[in-house]
Image (tube, rainbow, N blue to C red):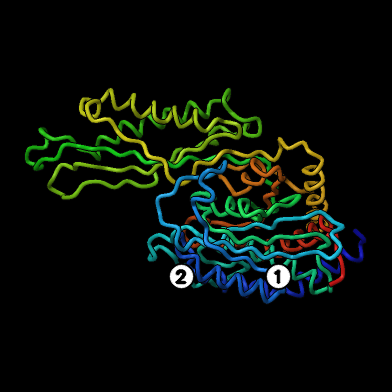
Amino acid sequence: MEQELQTRILHAVDDLFEREISFLTELTSHPSTRGNEQSAQTFMTSELKSRGLEVDQWQIDVDEISHLPGFSPVLAPYEDAQNVVGTHRSRTRKGRSLILNGHIDVVPAGPLDMWDRPPFEPHVDSGWLYGRGGGDMKAGLASNLFALEALKHLGLAPAADLFYQSVVEEECTGNGALACLARGYRADAALIPEPFAEQLVTSQIGVIWFQVHLKGLPTHVAYAGAGANAIEAAIPLIAALHEMEHRWNAAEHRHPDFAHHDHALNLNVGKIQGGDWTSSVPAWSTLDLRMAIFPGQDIEAAKAEIEATILEAARQNDFLKNSLPEVVYHGFLAEGYALSEDKSSTAKAAIGALETAHLATTGEALETSAITATTDARFFGLYADTPALVYGPRAEAIHGFNERVELESIRRITQSTALFIADWCGVEDI
Protein backbone atom coordinates (compact mmCIF):
# COMPACT_ATOMS: atom_id res chain seq x y z
CA MET A 1 0.00 0.00 0.00
CA GLU A 2 1.29 3.45 -0.86
CA GLN A 3 2.37 5.59 2.09
CA GLU A 4 0.09 8.41 0.99
CA LEU A 5 -3.01 6.20 1.07
CA GLN A 6 -1.98 4.73 4.39
CA THR A 7 -1.70 8.19 5.92
CA ARG A 8 -5.05 9.27 4.51
CA ILE A 9 -6.76 6.20 6.01
CA LEU A 10 -5.24 6.81 9.44
CA HIS A 11 -6.39 10.43 9.36
CA ALA A 12 -9.89 9.43 8.18
CA VAL A 13 -10.32 7.29 11.30
CA ASP A 14 -9.28 10.29 13.40
CA ASP A 15 -11.78 12.51 11.60
CA LEU A 16 -14.63 10.12 12.39
CA PHE A 17 -13.58 9.07 15.88
CA GLU A 18 -16.05 11.20 17.85
CA ARG A 19 -18.86 9.73 15.75
CA GLU A 20 -17.50 6.25 16.42
CA ILE A 21 -17.60 6.75 20.19
CA SER A 22 -21.11 8.19 19.94
CA PHE A 23 -22.15 5.10 18.00
CA LEU A 24 -20.54 2.84 20.60
CA THR A 25 -22.24 4.71 23.44
CA GLU A 26 -25.65 4.26 21.82
CA LEU A 27 -25.01 0.59 21.07
CA THR A 28 -23.82 -0.11 24.63
CA SER A 29 -27.00 1.42 26.04
CA HIS A 30 -29.01 -1.49 24.58
CA PRO A 31 -29.21 -4.23 27.28
CA SER A 32 -28.62 -7.03 24.79
CA THR A 33 -28.38 -10.01 27.11
CA ARG A 34 -29.38 -13.39 25.64
CA GLY A 35 -32.97 -13.19 24.48
CA ASN A 36 -32.97 -9.38 24.60
CA GLU A 37 -30.81 -8.56 21.58
CA GLN A 38 -33.64 -7.33 19.35
CA SER A 39 -33.36 -3.58 20.00
CA ALA A 40 -29.60 -3.64 19.50
CA GLN A 41 -29.97 -5.63 16.28
CA THR A 42 -32.65 -3.22 15.03
CA PHE A 43 -30.21 -0.39 15.70
CA MET A 44 -27.47 -2.26 13.81
CA THR A 45 -29.80 -2.88 10.86
CA SER A 46 -30.60 0.81 10.65
CA GLU A 47 -26.94 1.81 10.82
CA LEU A 48 -25.90 -0.66 8.13
CA LYS A 49 -28.71 0.33 5.79
CA SER A 50 -27.89 4.01 6.21
CA ARG A 51 -24.39 3.21 4.96
CA GLY A 52 -25.67 1.56 1.81
CA LEU A 53 -25.01 -2.04 2.77
CA GLU A 54 -27.34 -4.82 1.67
CA VAL A 55 -28.85 -6.03 4.97
CA ASP A 56 -29.96 -9.55 5.83
CA GLN A 57 -31.76 -9.88 9.17
CA TRP A 58 -33.17 -13.28 10.02
CA GLN A 59 -34.34 -15.42 12.88
CA ILE A 60 -32.15 -18.42 13.62
CA ASP A 61 -33.85 -21.76 13.06
CA VAL A 62 -32.30 -24.38 15.35
CA ASP A 63 -33.48 -27.18 13.07
CA GLU A 64 -31.39 -25.73 10.24
CA ILE A 65 -28.13 -25.82 12.22
CA SER A 66 -28.51 -28.60 14.80
CA HIS A 67 -26.93 -31.20 12.49
CA LEU A 68 -23.86 -29.09 11.70
CA PRO A 69 -20.39 -29.50 13.21
CA GLY A 70 -19.88 -27.04 16.05
CA PHE A 71 -23.54 -26.82 17.06
CA SER A 72 -24.13 -26.43 20.79
CA PRO A 73 -27.34 -27.76 22.39
CA VAL A 74 -29.78 -25.16 23.66
CA LEU A 75 -32.48 -25.11 26.30
CA ALA A 76 -33.81 -21.56 25.88
CA PRO A 77 -36.30 -20.63 23.13
CA TYR A 78 -34.99 -19.04 19.95
CA GLU A 79 -38.04 -17.05 18.89
CA ASP A 80 -36.12 -13.78 19.18
CA ALA A 81 -32.59 -14.89 18.25
CA GLN A 82 -31.79 -12.79 15.20
CA ASN A 83 -28.58 -12.26 13.24
CA VAL A 84 -27.77 -9.24 11.10
CA VAL A 85 -25.37 -9.24 8.16
CA GLY A 86 -24.53 -6.24 6.01
CA THR A 87 -23.01 -7.06 2.63
CA HIS A 88 -20.79 -4.90 0.46
CA ARG A 89 -20.64 -6.12 -3.14
CA SER A 90 -17.52 -5.03 -4.98
CA ARG A 91 -17.75 -3.83 -8.58
CA THR A 92 -14.28 -5.08 -9.51
CA ARG A 93 -13.74 -8.04 -7.13
CA LYS A 94 -10.03 -7.76 -7.69
CA GLY A 95 -9.18 -8.32 -4.03
CA ARG A 96 -9.73 -11.01 -1.41
CA SER A 97 -13.08 -11.31 0.35
CA LEU A 98 -13.49 -10.73 4.08
CA ILE A 99 -15.86 -11.36 6.98
CA LEU A 100 -15.92 -8.79 9.79
CA ASN A 101 -17.58 -10.63 12.65
CA GLY A 102 -18.72 -9.47 16.07
CA HIS A 103 -21.30 -10.50 18.64
CA ILE A 104 -24.08 -8.28 19.92
CA ASP A 105 -25.00 -10.36 23.00
CA VAL A 106 -23.61 -9.47 26.41
CA VAL A 107 -23.49 -11.30 29.73
CA PRO A 108 -25.83 -10.32 32.61
CA ALA A 109 -24.80 -7.31 34.65
CA GLY A 110 -25.15 -8.95 38.07
CA PRO A 111 -26.22 -7.00 41.19
CA LEU A 112 -26.72 -3.41 40.06
CA ASP A 113 -25.66 -1.96 43.41
CA MET A 114 -22.16 -3.32 42.80
CA TRP A 115 -21.70 -1.05 39.77
CA ASP A 116 -20.49 2.51 40.27
CA ARG A 117 -23.06 3.62 37.69
CA PRO A 118 -25.88 1.75 35.91
CA PRO A 119 -24.35 -0.78 33.49
CA PHE A 120 -26.51 0.18 30.53
CA GLU A 121 -26.00 3.92 30.91
CA PRO A 122 -22.54 4.07 29.32
CA HIS A 123 -20.27 7.00 30.07
CA VAL A 124 -16.74 8.15 29.27
CA ASP A 125 -14.30 8.92 32.05
CA SER A 126 -10.53 9.49 31.88
CA GLY A 127 -10.15 7.94 28.45
CA TRP A 128 -12.32 4.86 29.05
CA LEU A 129 -15.90 4.04 28.08
CA TYR A 130 -17.77 2.22 30.86
CA GLY A 131 -20.76 -0.06 30.45
CA ARG A 132 -21.75 -3.70 30.16
CA GLY A 133 -20.70 -4.99 26.75
CA GLY A 134 -18.76 -1.87 25.80
CA GLY A 135 -15.58 -3.93 25.76
CA ASP A 136 -16.99 -7.39 25.11
CA MET A 137 -17.51 -6.75 22.33
CA LYS A 138 -19.45 -3.77 21.08
CA ALA A 139 -16.24 -1.75 20.72
CA GLY A 140 -15.26 -4.37 18.16
CA LEU A 141 -18.52 -3.95 16.28
CA ALA A 142 -17.82 -0.21 16.25
CA SER A 143 -14.23 -0.61 15.02
CA ASN A 144 -15.35 -2.92 12.22
CA LEU A 145 -18.02 -0.48 11.07
CA PHE A 146 -15.93 2.66 11.30
CA ALA A 147 -12.99 1.05 9.53
CA LEU A 148 -15.35 0.74 6.56
CA GLU A 149 -16.66 4.23 7.21
CA ALA A 150 -13.10 5.61 7.08
CA LEU A 151 -12.64 4.19 3.58
CA LYS A 152 -16.00 5.60 2.51
CA HIS A 153 -14.94 8.98 3.94
CA LEU A 154 -12.14 8.92 1.36
CA GLY A 155 -14.44 7.92 -1.48
CA LEU A 156 -13.19 4.33 -1.40
CA ALA A 157 -14.71 0.89 -0.88
CA PRO A 158 -13.26 -2.62 -0.54
CA ALA A 159 -12.38 -4.14 -3.91
CA ALA A 160 -13.81 -7.48 -2.83
CA ASP A 161 -17.03 -8.72 -1.28
CA LEU A 162 -17.19 -7.99 2.42
CA PHE A 163 -19.67 -9.27 5.00
CA TYR A 164 -20.24 -7.34 8.21
CA GLN A 165 -21.76 -9.72 10.80
CA SER A 166 -23.53 -8.85 14.05
CA VAL A 167 -24.40 -12.18 15.64
CA VAL A 168 -26.13 -13.43 18.76
CA GLU A 169 -25.30 -16.29 21.14
CA GLU A 170 -21.49 -15.97 21.23
CA GLU A 171 -21.49 -15.88 25.03
CA CYS A 172 -23.21 -19.24 25.45
CA THR A 173 -23.12 -21.36 22.26
CA GLY A 174 -21.73 -19.63 19.19
CA ASN A 175 -24.77 -20.75 17.23
CA GLY A 176 -25.17 -17.24 15.79
CA ALA A 177 -21.88 -17.49 13.90
CA LEU A 178 -22.74 -21.05 12.88
CA ALA A 179 -26.04 -19.82 11.46
CA CYS A 180 -24.11 -17.36 9.27
CA LEU A 181 -22.11 -20.24 7.82
CA ALA A 182 -25.30 -22.25 7.28
CA ARG A 183 -26.79 -19.28 5.43
CA GLY A 184 -23.90 -19.37 2.98
CA TYR A 185 -21.68 -16.52 4.12
CA ARG A 186 -18.10 -17.41 3.19
CA ALA A 187 -14.94 -15.39 2.60
CA ASP A 188 -11.19 -15.78 2.23
CA ALA A 189 -10.55 -14.63 5.81
CA ALA A 190 -12.38 -13.44 8.93
CA LEU A 191 -11.49 -10.73 11.43
CA ILE A 192 -13.03 -10.76 14.92
CA PRO A 193 -12.10 -7.80 17.18
CA GLU A 194 -12.56 -9.45 20.58
CA PRO A 195 -10.99 -7.40 23.41
CA PHE A 196 -7.58 -9.02 23.81
CA ALA A 197 -5.39 -5.93 24.16
CA GLU A 198 -4.31 -5.44 20.53
CA GLN A 199 -2.71 -8.87 20.31
CA LEU A 200 -3.35 -11.53 17.69
CA VAL A 201 -4.85 -14.66 19.23
CA THR A 202 -2.94 -17.72 18.02
CA SER A 203 -4.90 -20.31 20.01
CA GLN A 204 -8.06 -20.53 22.06
CA ILE A 205 -9.42 -23.23 24.31
CA GLY A 206 -12.68 -25.09 23.81
CA VAL A 207 -15.51 -25.02 26.33
CA ILE A 208 -18.03 -27.57 27.61
CA TRP A 209 -21.08 -26.47 29.60
CA PHE A 210 -22.94 -29.14 31.53
CA GLN A 211 -25.42 -29.61 34.33
CA VAL A 212 -25.36 -32.20 37.10
CA HIS A 213 -28.79 -33.11 38.46
CA LEU A 214 -28.91 -34.62 41.95
CA LYS A 215 -31.83 -36.13 43.85
CA GLY A 216 -31.86 -36.33 47.65
CA LEU A 217 -34.17 -37.77 50.25
CA PRO A 218 -36.30 -35.04 51.86
CA THR A 219 -37.28 -34.99 55.48
CA HIS A 220 -37.91 -32.48 58.25
CA VAL A 221 -34.62 -31.00 59.37
CA ALA A 222 -35.33 -32.31 62.90
CA TYR A 223 -34.68 -35.78 61.47
CA ALA A 224 -31.91 -34.77 59.06
CA GLY A 225 -29.98 -38.00 59.68
CA ALA A 226 -32.80 -39.95 58.08
CA GLY A 227 -32.63 -37.90 54.86
CA ALA A 228 -30.05 -37.18 52.19
CA ASN A 229 -29.06 -33.60 51.39
CA ALA A 230 -28.95 -33.10 47.61
CA ILE A 231 -26.97 -29.86 47.96
CA GLU A 232 -24.27 -31.24 50.24
CA ALA A 233 -24.03 -34.31 47.99
CA ALA A 234 -22.58 -32.05 45.30
CA ILE A 235 -19.45 -31.31 47.35
CA PRO A 236 -17.55 -34.58 46.66
CA LEU A 237 -18.51 -34.41 43.00
CA ILE A 238 -17.04 -30.92 42.69
CA ALA A 239 -13.87 -32.10 44.40
CA ALA A 240 -13.54 -35.00 41.95
CA LEU A 241 -14.01 -32.69 38.98
CA HIS A 242 -11.27 -30.40 40.29
CA GLU A 243 -8.96 -33.42 40.46
CA MET A 244 -9.81 -34.12 36.81
CA GLU A 245 -9.10 -30.48 36.01
CA HIS A 246 -5.65 -30.86 37.57
CA ARG A 247 -4.92 -33.95 35.44
CA TRP A 248 -5.97 -32.25 32.23
CA ASN A 249 -3.64 -29.33 32.96
CA ALA A 250 -0.61 -31.60 33.44
CA ALA A 251 2.37 -30.66 31.26
CA GLU A 252 2.17 -33.85 29.20
CA HIS A 253 -1.42 -33.09 28.16
CA ARG A 254 -0.99 -29.45 27.10
CA HIS A 255 -1.32 -28.15 23.59
CA PRO A 256 2.06 -26.73 22.45
CA ASP A 257 0.72 -23.16 22.38
CA PHE A 258 -0.14 -23.51 26.08
CA ALA A 259 3.06 -25.27 27.14
CA HIS A 260 4.05 -22.25 29.25
CA HIS A 261 0.65 -22.04 30.96
CA ASP A 262 0.34 -24.07 34.17
CA HIS A 263 -3.44 -23.78 34.39
CA ALA A 264 -5.02 -22.96 31.04
CA LEU A 265 -8.05 -25.19 31.56
CA ASN A 266 -10.42 -23.96 34.23
CA LEU A 267 -13.40 -25.67 35.82
CA ASN A 268 -16.03 -23.22 37.02
CA VAL A 269 -19.01 -24.01 39.23
CA GLY A 270 -21.07 -21.22 37.73
CA LYS A 271 -24.43 -21.75 39.38
CA ILE A 272 -26.10 -24.00 41.94
CA GLN A 273 -29.79 -24.32 42.65
CA GLY A 274 -31.54 -26.63 45.04
CA GLY A 275 -33.96 -27.24 47.83
CA ASP A 276 -37.46 -25.99 48.50
CA TRP A 277 -37.62 -25.01 52.17
CA THR A 278 -35.11 -23.87 54.79
CA SER A 279 -36.27 -26.45 57.36
CA SER A 280 -36.44 -29.34 54.88
CA VAL A 281 -33.51 -31.48 53.83
CA PRO A 282 -33.23 -30.59 50.12
CA ALA A 283 -34.62 -33.17 47.74
CA TRP A 284 -32.87 -31.85 44.65
CA SER A 285 -30.04 -29.72 43.37
CA THR A 286 -28.70 -28.70 39.97
CA LEU A 287 -25.14 -27.60 39.28
CA ASP A 288 -24.19 -25.59 36.20
CA LEU A 289 -20.53 -26.10 35.36
CA ARG A 290 -18.03 -25.06 32.71
CA MET A 291 -14.91 -26.98 31.77
CA ALA A 292 -12.27 -26.08 29.18
CA ILE A 293 -10.38 -28.30 26.73
CA PHE A 294 -7.27 -27.75 24.62
CA PRO A 295 -7.27 -27.39 20.83
CA GLY A 296 -7.24 -30.87 19.37
CA GLN A 297 -8.64 -32.47 22.54
CA ASP A 298 -11.46 -34.79 21.49
CA ILE A 299 -14.71 -33.36 22.78
CA GLU A 300 -16.54 -36.70 23.00
CA ALA A 301 -13.66 -38.23 24.96
CA ALA A 302 -13.71 -35.22 27.27
CA LYS A 303 -17.44 -35.64 27.88
CA ALA A 304 -16.92 -39.33 28.61
CA GLU A 305 -14.25 -38.56 31.20
CA ILE A 306 -16.42 -35.89 32.83
CA GLU A 307 -19.26 -38.38 33.18
CA ALA A 308 -16.97 -41.15 34.42
CA THR A 309 -15.45 -38.81 37.02
CA ILE A 310 -18.87 -37.81 38.34
CA LEU A 311 -20.19 -41.36 38.46
CA GLU A 312 -17.07 -42.74 40.14
CA ALA A 313 -17.30 -40.09 42.86
CA ALA A 314 -21.03 -40.77 43.27
CA ARG A 315 -20.47 -44.50 43.70
CA GLN A 316 -18.17 -43.77 46.64
CA ASN A 317 -20.98 -41.89 48.39
CA ASP A 318 -23.30 -43.94 50.58
CA PHE A 319 -26.41 -42.22 49.28
CA LEU A 320 -25.47 -41.26 45.72
CA LYS A 321 -24.41 -44.78 44.79
CA ASN A 322 -28.10 -45.67 44.92
CA SER A 323 -29.25 -42.41 43.31
CA LEU A 324 -26.72 -41.66 40.58
CA PRO A 325 -26.46 -38.11 39.20
CA GLU A 326 -27.65 -37.21 35.74
CA VAL A 327 -25.39 -35.19 33.41
CA VAL A 328 -27.08 -32.89 30.87
CA TYR A 329 -25.28 -30.84 28.21
CA HIS A 330 -26.53 -27.41 27.14
CA GLY A 331 -24.81 -24.31 25.93
CA PHE A 332 -21.18 -24.44 24.88
CA LEU A 333 -19.98 -27.66 23.31
CA ALA A 334 -17.04 -25.99 21.64
CA GLU A 335 -13.78 -27.32 20.31
CA GLY A 336 -10.54 -25.41 20.73
CA TYR A 337 -9.01 -23.66 17.72
CA ALA A 338 -5.39 -22.85 16.91
CA LEU A 339 -4.73 -20.36 14.12
CA SER A 340 -1.07 -21.26 14.63
CA GLU A 341 -1.77 -24.68 13.10
CA ASP A 342 -3.11 -23.21 9.86
CA LYS A 343 -0.10 -23.41 7.52
CA SER A 344 -2.02 -22.39 4.40
CA SER A 345 -0.80 -19.58 2.18
CA THR A 346 -4.08 -17.76 2.87
CA ALA A 347 -3.52 -17.76 6.62
CA LYS A 348 0.08 -16.65 6.17
CA ALA A 349 -1.01 -13.78 3.92
CA ALA A 350 -3.80 -12.68 6.27
CA ILE A 351 -1.53 -12.67 9.31
CA GLY A 352 1.12 -10.79 7.33
CA ALA A 353 -1.40 -8.15 6.26
CA LEU A 354 -2.53 -7.64 9.87
CA GLU A 355 1.07 -7.46 11.10
CA THR A 356 1.78 -4.74 8.52
CA ALA A 357 -1.36 -2.81 9.48
CA HIS A 358 -0.62 -3.02 13.19
CA LEU A 359 2.97 -1.85 12.69
CA ALA A 360 1.85 1.09 10.57
CA THR A 361 -0.67 2.14 13.22
CA THR A 362 1.31 1.61 16.40
CA GLY A 363 4.94 1.60 15.31
CA GLU A 364 5.35 -1.72 17.11
CA ALA A 365 5.44 -5.37 16.06
CA LEU A 366 2.21 -7.33 16.52
CA GLU A 367 2.31 -9.49 19.63
CA THR A 368 0.51 -12.83 19.84
CA SER A 369 -1.14 -14.76 22.65
CA ALA A 370 -2.86 -18.05 23.40
CA ILE A 371 -6.02 -17.28 25.35
CA THR A 372 -7.89 -19.27 28.00
CA ALA A 373 -11.29 -18.33 26.60
CA THR A 374 -13.21 -19.25 23.47
CA THR A 375 -14.48 -17.09 20.59
CA ASP A 376 -16.46 -17.57 17.39
CA ALA A 377 -13.18 -17.90 15.49
CA ARG A 378 -13.46 -21.68 15.74
CA PHE A 379 -16.39 -21.83 13.33
CA PHE A 380 -14.43 -20.21 10.54
CA GLY A 381 -11.15 -21.98 11.23
CA LEU A 382 -12.45 -25.48 11.95
CA TYR A 383 -15.57 -25.76 9.79
CA ALA A 384 -15.14 -23.31 6.89
CA ASP A 385 -11.42 -23.57 6.10
CA THR A 386 -11.14 -19.84 6.74
CA PRO A 387 -8.33 -18.31 8.81
CA ALA A 388 -9.90 -16.31 11.63
CA LEU A 389 -7.89 -13.43 13.08
CA VAL A 390 -8.94 -12.41 16.60
CA TYR A 391 -7.57 -8.92 17.23
CA GLY A 392 -9.34 -6.25 19.24
CA PRO A 393 -8.99 -3.39 21.75
CA ARG A 394 -7.87 -3.27 25.34
CA ALA A 395 -10.71 -3.76 27.81
CA GLU A 396 -10.92 -4.46 31.52
CA ALA A 397 -13.46 -6.13 33.83
CA ILE A 398 -15.27 -7.88 30.99
CA HIS A 399 -17.97 -10.10 32.58
CA GLY A 400 -17.31 -8.13 35.78
CA PHE A 401 -18.43 -4.91 37.43
CA ASN A 402 -17.57 -1.55 35.84
CA GLU A 403 -16.56 -3.10 32.52
CA ARG A 404 -14.57 -0.60 30.47
CA VAL A 405 -12.74 -0.23 27.16
CA GLU A 406 -9.90 2.16 26.38
CA LEU A 407 -10.77 4.81 23.80
CA GLU A 408 -7.30 5.22 22.30
CA SER A 409 -7.08 1.46 21.92
CA ILE A 410 -10.36 1.52 19.97
CA ARG A 411 -8.87 4.21 17.74
CA ARG A 412 -5.77 2.11 17.04
CA ILE A 413 -7.78 -1.04 16.34
CA THR A 414 -10.05 0.89 13.97
CA GLN A 415 -7.02 2.26 12.13
CA SER A 416 -5.36 -1.14 11.90
CA THR A 417 -8.61 -2.70 10.69
CA ALA A 418 -9.07 -0.05 8.02
CA LEU A 419 -5.51 -0.57 6.79
CA PHE A 420 -5.99 -4.34 6.86
CA ILE A 421 -9.19 -4.10 4.77
CA ALA A 422 -7.46 -1.83 2.25
CA ASP A 423 -4.54 -4.26 1.95
CA TRP A 424 -6.46 -7.53 2.05
CA CYS A 425 -9.43 -6.53 -0.09
CA GLY A 426 -7.82 -3.76 -2.07
CA VAL A 427 -9.78 -0.57 -2.72
CA GLU A 428 -11.92 0.79 -5.52
CA ASP A 429 -13.63 4.11 -6.04
CA ILE A 430 -17.19 4.35 -4.80
SS under mark 2: loop
Q: Nearer the viewer, residue 119 or 333?
A: 333
The residue singled out by tag 2 in the image is: 117
State the quadrant of the N terminus.
Answer: bottom right
Using the image, determine if residue 311 lies above or below residue 136: above
Marks 1, 2: nearer the viewer: 1
Q: Residue at x 25, y 25 (%)?
A: 321
Q: Residue lying furthest front in this view?
A: 63
Q: Quadrant of residue 344?
A: top right
- Which residue type does callout 1 highlight? Leu
| Mark 1 vs 2, N-terminal side | 1
The residue singled out by tag 1 in the image is: 53
106 displayed left or right of 347: left
Q: Which x, y percent locates residue 84?
A: 60, 64
State the quadrant of the C terminus.
Answer: bottom right
- Which residue type does callout 2 highlight? Arg
Q: Residue at x 40, y 54 (%)?
A: 76
Q: What crowding class fits label 1: few (fewer than 14 Cα within 10 Å), some (14-19), or many (20 or more)?
A: some
Q: What crowding class fits label 2: few (fewer than 14 Cα within 10 Å), some (14-19), or many (20 or more)?
A: some
Q: Residue at x 62, y 55 (%)?
A: 183
State how far apart marks 1 and 2 are (Cα).
35 Å
Q: Which x, y percent locates residue 302?
A: 48, 30
Q: Residue at x 70, y 49 (%)?
A: 389
SS under mark 1: loop
Using the image, determine if residue 294 lies above or below residue 109: above
Q: Nearer the viewer, residue 104 or 403?
A: 104
Q: Nearer the viewer, residue 61 or 197?
A: 61
Q: Quadrant of residue 286?
A: top left
Using the image, determine if residue 296 lies above or below residue 316: below
